[in-house]
Image: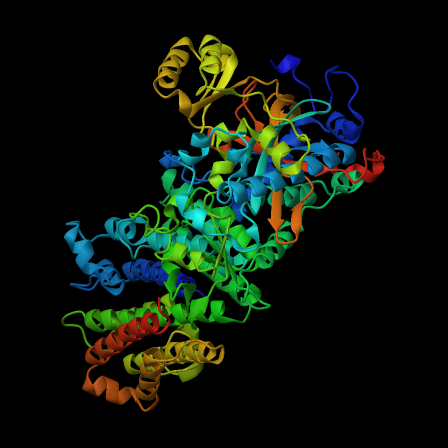
Amino acid sequence: MTDLAFDEMHGFTGQEPRSSYRAIADWLHRTDHADLASQQQAAETIFRKLGITFAVYGDEDAEERIIPFDIVPRVLAAKEWGRLEEGLIQRVSAINAFLTDIYGKREILKAGILPPELILANPQFRLAMTTIRPPHDVWAHICGIDMVRTGPDEFFVLEDNARTPSGVSYMLENREAMQRLFPDLVAAHRVRPVESYPDMLLAMMRSVAPKGSGDDPCCAILTPGQFNSAFYEHSFLADHIGVELVEGNDLQVVDRRLFMRTTEGMKRIDVLYRRVDDDFLDPLMFRPDSILGVPGLMDAYAAGNITIVNAPGTGIADDKAIYSYMPEIVRFYTGKDAILPNVHTYRCREADDLGYVLDHLSELVVKLVDGSGGYGMLVGPRSTKAEIEAFRAQIIATPQRYIAQPTLALSTCPTLVEEGIAPRHVDLRPFVLTGSKGTKIVPGGLTRVALQQGSLVVNSSQGGGTKDTWVLADDEPTIPSPAANGKEA
Amino acid sequence: MLSRTASSLYWIGRHIERADFVARLIEAALQFELLPQARGSDDWGSAVSSSGAMDRFAASGQDVNRTNVIAFLAFDQDNPGSIMSCMDMARNDARAIRTAITRECFETLNEAHLAMKTQVRRGKTGDIQGFIDWIKSVTRGFEGAMHRTMLRNDSLWFLRLGSAIERADNTARLLDVKYHCLLPQGEEVGGTHDQAQWTALLRSVSAVTAYRWIYRDGLKPWLVADLMILRREMPRSLAACVDEAGAMLACLRADGGRTGAADRQIRKMQIGLTKLQVDEVIKSGLHEFLQEFLADNNQLGRAVSDQFLF
């Protein structure tokens, strides 16, 4: 499969590097493997010292493990990014309009675009939100849209993460590492900066504060605590935007207002960026056994005294069954065709599709509609007969829980592995921010890479790694002279 | 500041101080061991007592000897007062409140944590003196990072408040235990063994030269007590620790922190020490005085948690 895939550096031909990668190709060509490997080691040391670790559920020995970082950057030319950016803004605008609609007038259901039971009987649908309007009508403030590529102009959306997408800290730290290790290479590429993300995030949060919270709204980030797999990111973000990182037991709702317990007494919070799932937000409203949230939070929310980022109930928009309707959803709310296409998706809930899927399991990728993190999925071409048959039984038992997609020839990017530089499959997760003043994206995002040869699963919980993503200010870098680049040689 | 954050900072301060102290206890016991043994001396037992964990150690049913005590005080993860446990707890707290301390402070603890894990995994725990020196350098490194890089604000005040209260506790404990085992049966006060014990005690808190510098006199038990209890110049003396804790509480007040029981308690402790002469302490009983001080200091710790809503 690797042989057929589009390579980010060499294209389909495997010959001359594409123009945006010329300087990278040159650098890889003149630096020997041992030097690259030692730089890779240096990067890992930096990360481990900074405590960038990632807890993997169900793996106690590896309570703290570094997500592998690959030093070969993934490059996007200015015009490639331009189209992606336009498409992402369109898609996220549609997602927000969709959420306003289905928790409000439900015009999309009246128009017969979606089967009503797909929304109303969906476990991600939050009935409570039908009577609450999020301040400024923004629902999905932070989206991480997973993109894959199969050709020079063929980008597809693979998943819309509209709940609490993670990975943005790796985007920022990867850049910092690259700048430390290869300052000249970064400079020669005129890479558009990502450092403004924390400022953009804070500005977005302040812009959606409830009315009446004054000129200086108090923002905070809610974390499940230090044993959560993404805790490092929660603390990283709190640190970089300069707000408190709170846990459920720091918070209290009094008179339908949210407060945090401080050494100076109780302090009011206006905007809460929660990195806790809906189910755990408020034991009075959702799961009664949750100790991660705050009793009464949803009541304060209903009273309009707090903004929750992202709003509860956004999970419906990244449900994989809804995903298959995204082209129609985009068209319905924006009046235009989606700039970014979906991957063709078979809905196992529909008899025809189910039949096709069961006949072609060995060729397809099958996913749970509400699964994430690479769990609960079948990659047909890479599975044994026994695995396929086990999965078949599960699909037949509850077909509505599954969708299937053709196995895409995901693009590859040169990656440093033990044997040297080799192509490995990559995806891209840009982070899209929506506040009361519109939608913005920091150029680039997180490139994830499947480090196993031929593997298509890039999730960090499944052994994937990351790369720095360079969006060039121009379409191609100026080739640095070897002398100016001596440091890396 | 979040009360939880303040609590974590306070406990980082305490645990780092405790780790340093336990390292010094082991060092002192190693030195005592080199002295010609007097009958009934129990250097390793007194190290465990000074750490405040004799009950726990006794419950384990182990013999009191060099190997067992070192394993217990340095590496035993079931002993919450071991160096290993203290460093782990400090690092876990630091990780939980990563935003409240500087990168350099965090890195010091994180690197120490990683190095200790590796060392224990490889079973390289034989060079105890090397380990002690390393722990002392880690705690110095943390304090250096703290003084050099942290903003002068409530984060720093809570860290230092924790250190000061823990340090007072440790000094009082150290003195109390040495008070008990100071005079091996049948030996004269001021005998050679006695002198050597006091020297080792001073050395364990790096205060031999300080003693000479302040008193310009031979080692006398009451002067050692004076140095460790009342001398404000001596960074480990009870008076200096109480002053430091008082200063930190004053900074927190000035920064708008809540006021209350802890402020009253520290005032009471400060006044108590100001009026005191060492003769009175010795006359009315050093042990009783230290026990009372430890109780007051514990009360201060509780008042701090109440006052700042920990």
The x and y percentages for residue A467 are 62, 34
At horizontal 55% and vertical 39% (from top left) the residue drawn is A98
Q: Name the residue located 59 percent from the left edge and 18 percent from the top edge.
A: A408
Is residue A427 found left or right of A355 in the rendered image?
right
| Image quarter of residue B235 | bottom left
- Count the labels in the image: 0
Q: Residue B150's image quarter?
A: bottom right
Residue found at x 54% / y 66%: A213
For the C terminus of chain B, the image quarter is bottom left
* Residue A446 can be seen, yes or no: no
Q: Camera-side residue: A416 or B275?
A: A416
Whether residue A267 is situated above or below residue A367 in the rendered picture: below
Which residue occupies the foreground of this view, A165 or A15?
Answer: A165
Tell me residue A402's x, y (percent). 44, 23
Counting from the top left corner in percent of width and height, residue B43 is at: 24, 61
- Point out the residue furthest to the bottom here: B275
